[in-house]
Amino acid sequence: MLSRVANNLIWLDRYMERGNSIVSLLKVNFYANQDSPELFPWAPIIKNYTDFDNPFTTEDAIECIDYMVFNPNHSNSILNIVTRARENARSVQEHISRELWLCINNYFLFLTDKTLSKKINDEDPVAFLEKLKSFHLTYLGTMDTTQERGASYNFMNVGKFLERVIQISDFTALKLVKIATTSDSLEQSFYWKNLLLSIGGYQLYLKKHKSTFNENHVITMVFKDKLFPRSVLYCIDKLNKHIQMLIEIQELEKNNLDFLIGKLESTIKYTTIESINEQGLENFIKDIKEDIKSISLSINTVYFSYSS
Amino acid sequence: MTNETLFSSYSLLPDTWDEMYASKTKIRQQYDLISSFLKNTSPEVLYKKEELSKQLFMSQGVTFTVYNDNEGIEKIFPFDIIPRIITSNEWQKIDKGIKQRLKALNLFIKDIYHEQFILKDGIISSELIYACPNYLREMVGVNVPYDIYVHIAGVDLIRNNDGEFYVLEDNLRTPSGVSYMLENREISKRIFPGVLPKNGIRSVSNYPNILYKKLSELSDQNNPNVVLLTPGIYNSAYYEHSTLARLMGIELVEGSDLVVKDHFVYMKTTNGLKRVDVIYRRVDDAFLDPLEFNASSTLGIAGVMASYRKGNVNIVNAPGTGVADDKAIYVHVPDMIKYYLNEDPILKNIETYQLAIPEDYDYVSKNIEKMVIKKTDGSGGYGMLMGHEASQKEIEDYLKTVRENPSNFIAQPILRLSTAPCSIDGVLSPRCVDLRPFALSGKDGIDITPGGLTRVALKKGSLVVNSSQGGGSKDTWVIQ
């Protein structure tokens, strides 16, 4: 496969996954913010997805959603993310299924419809965010049912799981900042619950632990659960599988990629909750993000190794 | 419910051939089936079908992007649902005529870059060739596989008021529009269910297969690696590049994906360099190789021309074919047919005046309201002067530029392009059309897909069919 194509496939899925996470986050925060705006402000979300010198901020829910979805100058607005995802898809149309292309092109056309941005003001913002979410779910389903399991599929999944680990780490780090500001355990439990909702694990948590919030249970689920599709361990495991596939079909060089991903997987698997607490969760997250960065750079060398 | 309003106000243009109406009341036989289908379709249903066609183009991404205030707007190439129908006899003549023409043009290009018999015999003047900006000295003496230079041509034809087809332009470089020919047909199948087979309309869907066959046959390798070179996603024809690559199952590459090493061309893949044998390029000559042509080009591949001259890679169409579709050379195509084939041209040229010839210049300037003046190296409908709609000042300014370098300009009488019915605001109105059939040349001869792209000037009274200037397209049906 052309190196450029591999690169574009990875980024196609990175963008789609990022969009997916942002839409979920906005919806969850919308609900929480209506309950207690002081605990769940909008500013940290805007800050996390914009450049350090971005002057814009707001505590108005509709204004924030509008900014996060439509602002053309905000590089992580859903509009820009989907536009870039579509450009990537467009440049690799022969490598993705026809259905997947139609799916992402329709999402793009939906977002660029001039009458749309008025709708979030006039209509229910949750219904609007759910509509966006449904495009992401359709995308994931379409990819799963129509994309042949060759190099393209594996590269796309590498992008998807890389981005998902980054998003989970970011969400958690965002909450940790808030948690550190209070010693009230009830308030802390709100934050943990909110984290689970944002990454979509609340339902599973209730099933496992009922409605009792225990910090260690939450951390274990978010980072170490084998069966929860949005846990860090699950994503790393998937990432590893797709990278192994690519190495097997000789689309990726082993280099130290093999080593890096294996090391990260073991670290997460075998670090006990006690030792996470001992080193501090924020440090644990920091290390994960460092490792993800090295893996991503190591994959990148594939594209550059043949550019003369 | 019948739809009489649709046909109610069709007023034929004076002194113009109409594709559907033989006279005010008589519909040509080839349009019988479609016109009765339309008469039995209510305006609402027809409107829905039009909307459906727009939707299909949009959602499939059959679009080009227009950039405005940093905002990309997706546009579709307007599609008129009423097909343009060509009879079997008419097609036979077109088919023969284009084949004859391409045969002669190919021989001409080979001759020009080798012995130059046609110049030595005084049929065409050397000045004309050497002054042509598309003549490439880099191609002199280069032998190309099977002596084929023009593998893909999109000859533009128009039908004059005498009912005959004339050649307007030969388009021997990288003609576009074939994806619309394919896409329009797919949409017709849905809009007019059952009408195509009942009419015995010839299929166009084989085009990508024939193209792939011709491309791969150029290489002497087993299982050659054929790629399509595109300038990238911001090119207005990107959709076409991507579609053709997908339909042929070949890799779509950009200049930066390719590299030349030891006079071989390779593409950069995730598991190393892979040799490229045939490049179907949709990049103009000038941008093909920064080492030989435009040095600032990032769309091409450094060293590809050297590799090509060594025979290590094939480039389609061959560089330098532009010399034969220059408007100043166009005048001489009938002479070429006579000279190389000893035949009379089957398809006629449009009467053309060369402004470098004083008598021609005099005639044109005296009859300017009946003339269109074109730059010899222009395309896309730009840089033309339409005598009947220009102001006195525009004419004077234009003629001043002409006098500075008269050999860069030609003039042709303003033509009566034939009209075909278009569905506009719920009624049929006549609009001017041309026809671009697509011809593929390979080692086993020339194949022309029955049909092609019919372009329409959607603006009332306009003669300009170019997509960049408000043109649209129609499906073209050729009857078996």
Image (cartoon, coloured by chain):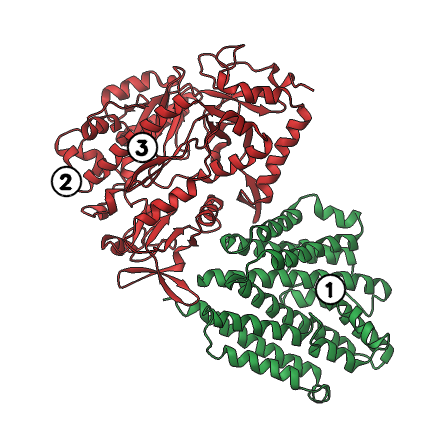
Chain colours: A green, B red
Q: Which residue is mark 1?
A: A25
On residue B376, which mark appears? 3
Give me the residue at 73% from left, 57% from top: A65
The part of the image, by quadrant, that contains residue B386 is top left
Of residues B428 and B440, the one drawn nearer to the viewer in this rendering: B440
Inter-mark Cα distance, 1 to 3: 60 Å
**Mark 3 neighbour class, 10 Å CA radius: few under 14, some 14 to 19, many 20 or more:** many
Residue B154 higher or lower than B21, as above or below: below
Find residue A140 and report its horizontal and vertical position in percent: 64, 59
Q: Amino acid at mark 2?
A: Glu
**Chain designation of label 2:** B
Q: Regarding mark 3 in the picture, which secondary structure is present there?
A: loop
Q: Regarding mark 2 in the picture, which secondary structure is present there?
A: loop
Give me the residue at 56% from left, 40% from top: B75
Q: Is residue A93 visible?
A: yes
Marks 1 and 3: CB-CB under 8 Å? no
- Discs 1 and 2 share one subunit: no
Find residue B230 and report its horizontal and vertical position in percent: 42, 50
The part of the image, by quadrant, that contains residue A169 is bottom right
Of residues B125 and B224, the one drawn nearer to the viewer in this rendering: B224
Q: Amino acid at mark 3?
A: Thr
- Discs 3 and 2 share one subunit: yes
Quadrant in which the C terminus of chain B appears: top left
On residue B108, which mark appears? none
Q: Which residue is mark 2?
A: B115
**Chain designation of label 3:** B
Tell me the mark number nearer the camera, choosing from 3 and 2: 2
> Which of marks 2 and 3 precedes in the sequence?
2
